[in-house]
Structures are given as structure tokens and as C-alpha cells.
Amino acid sequence: MDTDQTLSGGGKLPLWVVRLLALGGAPPSLANMVGTTHVFVAKNATSGDGQFASITAALAAQKDQTGSEQSILTIFIKEGVYNEILNITRKHVILIGEGAGKTVITGNRSYGFDNLTTPDTATVSVHGMAFMAQDLTIRNTAGPKGLQAVALMSQSNFSLIYRCSIEGYQDTLFANKGDQIYLETDIHGTVDFVFGYAKASFLGCRLLVRSSGLGASKPNVITAQGRSNSTDRSGFSFQNCSVKADEGADLTGVKTFLGRPWKNHSHVIFMESFLDSIVNFTGWVEWEGRGPIPETVLYLEYDNYGPGADTSRRINITAVRIVTDCHEAAQYTADPFVDANFWMPKDKEGRDIIPYARGLSRDPTACPPATRA
Ligand SMILES: *[C@@H]1O[C@H](CO)[C@@H](O)[C@H](O)[C@H]1NC(C)=O
Ligand SMILES: *[C@@H]1O[C@H](CO)[C@@H](O)[C@H](O)[C@H]1NC(C)=O
Ligand SMILES: *[C@@H]1O[C@H](CO)[C@@H](O)[C@H](O)[C@H]1NC(C)=O
Ligand SMILES: *[C@@H]1O[C@H](CO)[C@@H](O)[C@H](O)[C@H]1NC(C)=O
Ligand SMILES: *[C@@H]1O[C@H](CO)[C@@H](O)[C@H](O)[C@H]1NC(C)=O
Ligand SMILES: *[C@@H]1O[C@H](CO)[C@@H](O)[C@H](O)[C@H]1NC(C)=O
Ligand SMILES: *[C@@H]1O[C@H](CO)[C@@H](O)[C@H](O)[C@H]1NC(C)=O
Ligand SMILES: *[C@@H]1O[C@H](CO)[C@@H](O)[C@H](O)[C@H]1NC(C)=O
Ligand SMILES: *[C@@H]1O[C@H](CO)[C@@H](O)[C@H](O)[C@H]1NC(C)=O
Ligand SMILES: *[C@@H]1O[C@H](CO)[C@@H](O)[C@H](O)[C@H]1NC(C)=O
């Protein structure tokens, strides 16, 4: 990153932003200042910390509402709770907070209380391509009785969510469409809390299962992936993640499953991940009222560990398979799976600005390149 803290517009970076940049890696927009607009949001705008008191105002004030490759909009958001519903339609928007739990974007729309369709419940919706969020929390507080209540809905191709916390109950994260990466991000929820039609890699993420308080008859389910037909390429890959009970969640008597088939070709792999004892020994479960898991579904597990990773009693159907060939597993690492090397941010020398796992990582020696026949 340039040490010069003068903005292209001539202004100076506020002190809290300088501090923030000193803590983490330089965000991609700062590696290449050309064509980049920086704006600063602080709840308390009177203190001189920010140009805007809300993210909504910062977005609305931009002359360029469309964005392009050459025009990146970076919004720095100071610590604080922002009670806002955001609909980001511009391309190349980067939201950077002061830390998950510190910068919080929160809403409480839901199907249960507001009779909204699932996508319309989202606290943050992203339609523009190449979106990025870093160091912040996105929350939906409608609670379990709100039923479908999305915190983040992203249909941004090439979207990167880095060191964030996505918090809700049912349907927390709607990874709707496009190639996406969730890196070192916590996702909290109860039922179907990672769902959608995106092709998404989850790297170093924590999946934190909450208690819905709706009783033992309501199981918790982590994924409801939406691949619907044989030409659709979508799917979810979890690598180096962990599945655990959320802090303080009492899951006694409540079953937790890795996934259920929202659509007939649902496609998910958990690999090199820690599965705690909350994961039911059958692993995966059918969609209530729709009969057995269809044969067109593909649920894979590779080299997971922890008490929930014992696959000896997994549901015995063709849709559920334990991968033993590392070359098959390697196809689900981020580079091939979501073409990460093509679009993850790079510095001028072509190095990753934000490092991520480029291959299998638990035991790199275990998977030598395939030998030619
Ligand atoms: C806002 O900033 C002003 C000036 O720094 C300060 O006096 C005031 O206490 C702040 N208010 C809040 C709510 O933080
Ligand atoms: C919920 O919304 C649907 C669709 O807009 C509408 O048909 C229905 O009457 C609404 N239900 C209630 C209880 O408001
Ligand atoms: C967000 O904007 C898009 C594009 O204008 C629109 O289709 C969508 O309905 C909006 N979503 C919400 C929740 O307002
Ligand atoms: C949602 O938040 C509003 C205030 O922002 C509050 O009036 C309402 O009761 C909340 N609804 C739920 C279901 O929590
Ligand atoms: C995302 O972009 C890639 C590369 O341009 C393209 O192949 C893919 O179809 C796009 N995905 C969606 C859902 O638009
Ligand atoms: C695994 O994820 C953790 C964060 O949860 C990260 O610190 C670590 O570097 C990751 N390991 C690899 C090999 O990517
Ligand atoms: C297959 O799924 C894709 C992605 O959801 C969709 O765009 C396409 O229309 C579907 N094709 C058929 C034949 O249903
Ligand atoms: C799955 O396929 C069956 C048989 O073709 C069909 O009846 C059913 O509606 C499909 N389910 C979904 C969720 O698309
Ligand atoms: C795991 O799920 C199966 C099938 O639903 C159920 O019979 C079993 O009791 C569950 N095990 C635990 C420990 O909850
Ligand atoms: C799984 O089912 C097949 C037949 O469908 C059977 O041959 C095999 O022994 C079963 N495996 C286990 C572990 O029960």
C-alpha cells in the first residue's frame, strides 16, 4: 500500500481509518488508488470523523450509481450500530468496518412478522458485481419466530466477504448467485442458514449453530443449496471451516444436520473441517415432506475431523459419499471451484493482498500431482 495517506481528491484520511489500515492488510482499493472513491461513514457525524452519518446516505450521495471496473467505491464505516436496510446495486462497492462486532449493520425484516418474501427480508442485499465486505457484522434480529429472516443476500458475481460476522436464525445467508468467497467469516443461524444458488467457497469460516427454542422436533440444518438441474454449476464448498454450537446455545436434544436438498441437484462438500459432536451421525437429512434425498443430489465429505466427522453411520444412499481421492477433493478448493485466482485482489506485483488457501491444506504431501498414464 502507498504510505502516502493523501486521497486522490486531495483530502486526508481520517485518523481512525489510518489506524484501521495499520491493523489489517491494505484493502484492494488502496493498493490501486486510481479511480477509487473513498467515503467515510460515522454514526456521530458531528465529530468530524465521517462525511455521512449513515451508509444509506453515503451510497445515495454518489454521482456514479452504476460503477465500473475503473470506479471502485470504498466506504469506511466507523464503529457503531447502523440500523439500516441496504440495497447495493452499484458495481465494485467495498464496505470496511472497524471489526466484526464493532461495526454492525442491523435490521429485523422477516417473513414471519412482516409477510415479506425471503429476499426482501435481507438487511443487506447486494446486486452489483464484485462486492466486498471486510471487518463488520451484518445482522437480522427478527429471531426464530420471524422464520425466514435474511441478514445478507448476495447475488454479486465475484463477491468476497472477509472477517465478517453474519448473524441470524433461519436463512441467515442467502448466497444467491455468482462465484463467491467467504473467508474467515462467522455465520450464525438455525435452519438452512447458508442457502442459495451461488457457487461459493467458504474458507476458514465458523458455522455457529444457535438454539431456535422451537423444540426438539425442529432440527437445525446448516445448508440448503439450490442447484436445481444438471446444467446448473452452483454449489457450496466448505474448507478449513468449523461447525460448532454458538456461544451459550443449548442444543440438547436438538438434531443438527450438514444439509438438506432445497433443490433436486443440491451440491455441497465439507472438507478439511472440524465437525463438533452436534452434527448428527447420519450427517444429511431429507427435506420434510418430499421423501428421500434424490439420487441427483451430491453431498460429499473429505478429511474432516472432530466428533461429528465420524462417517461410519452416515445415511447410506448414493447421494452421500465420502471422498477418498484427494484429486477429487482438490477440485473443490477455491482456485478451481470459484476461479479465485482470477478475481481475488492482487497487488501491483500480482501477489495476493488477502491470502487464502490455494489447495488442500491439512496435509499438502498427501496429494501429489496425478501422474500421467
Ligand atoms: C459526537 O462527537 C462530539 C464531538 O467529538 C462529542 O462531543 C459527542 O459526545 C459525540 N456523541 C456521541 C453520541 O458519541
Ligand atoms: C402476505 O402477502 C401476500 C402476498 O403479497 C398476500 O397475498 C397475503 O394476503 C399477505 N398475508 C397477510 C396475512 O397479510
Ligand atoms: C434492490 O434493487 C434491485 C434492483 O433495483 C431490485 O430489483 C430489488 O427489488 C431491490 N431489493 C430490495 C429489497 O429493495
Ligand atoms: C423491529 O424493529 C423496530 C424498530 O426498528 C421495532 O419497532 C419492531 O418491534 C422490531 N420488530 C421485531 C420483530 O423485532
Ligand atoms: C460470473 O462470472 C463468470 C466469469 O465471467 C461467468 O462465467 C459466470 O457465468 C458468472 N456467473 C453468473 C451467475 O453470472
Ligand atoms: C484455516 O482457517 C483459519 C481461520 O479460521 C486461518 O487462521 C488459517 O490460516 C486457515 N488455514 C489454512 C491452511 O488456510
Ligand atoms: C438450470 O438452473 C439454472 C440456474 O438456476 C437456470 O438458470 C436454468 O434455467 C435451469 N435450466 C433448466 C432447464 O431448468
Ligand atoms: C424434484 O424432481 C421431482 C421429479 O422430477 C419433481 O417432482 C420435484 O418437483 C422436484 N423438486 C424440486 C424441489 O424441484
Ligand atoms: C440422529 O438422527 C437420527 C435420524 O433422524 C435419529 O434417529 C437420532 O436419534 C439422531 N441422533 C441424535 C444423537 O440426536
Ligand atoms: C449401504 O447399502 C448398500 C446397498 O444399498 C449395502 O450393500 C451396504 O452394505 C450398505 N453399507 C452400510 C455401511 O450399511
Image: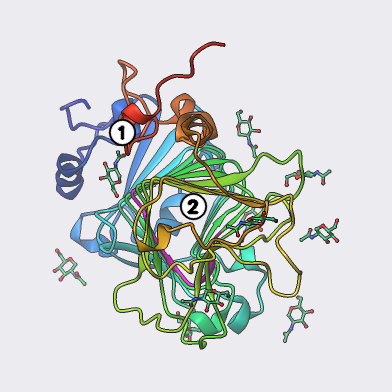
Q: Which mark is residue 355?
A: 1
Left or right placement of residue 260 versus residue 105 in this view: right
The residue located at (57%, 85%) in the rendering is 217
Give the mark count.
2
Residue 13 appears at what percent x and percent y? 21, 40
**Kind of element beneath mark 2:** helix
The residue located at (52%, 87%) in the rendering is 214
The image quadrant where one finds ligand 3 is bottom right
Q: Residues within 10 Å of mark 1 (few under 14, many from 20)?
A: few
Residue range (magenta): 184-194
Q: Nearer the viewer, residue 14 or 349?
A: 349
Residue type marked 2: Ala
Left or right placement of residue 122 versus residue 20 in this view: right
Residue type marked 1: Pro
Residue 8 appears at what percent x and percent y? 30, 29
Work out whether 131 lies above or below 33: below
Q: Residues within 10 Å of mark 2 (few under 14, many from 20)?
A: few
Q: Nearer the viewer, residue 66 or 338?
A: 338
Residue 366 appears at what percent x and percent y? 36, 30
Q: Which mark is residue 22?
A: none
Ligand 6 under 8 Å from disc 1 Cβ: yes
- Can residue 68 be seen here? no
The residue located at (43%, 58%) in the rendering is 310
Q: Quadrant of residue 361?
A: top left
| Residue hosting label 2 | 60
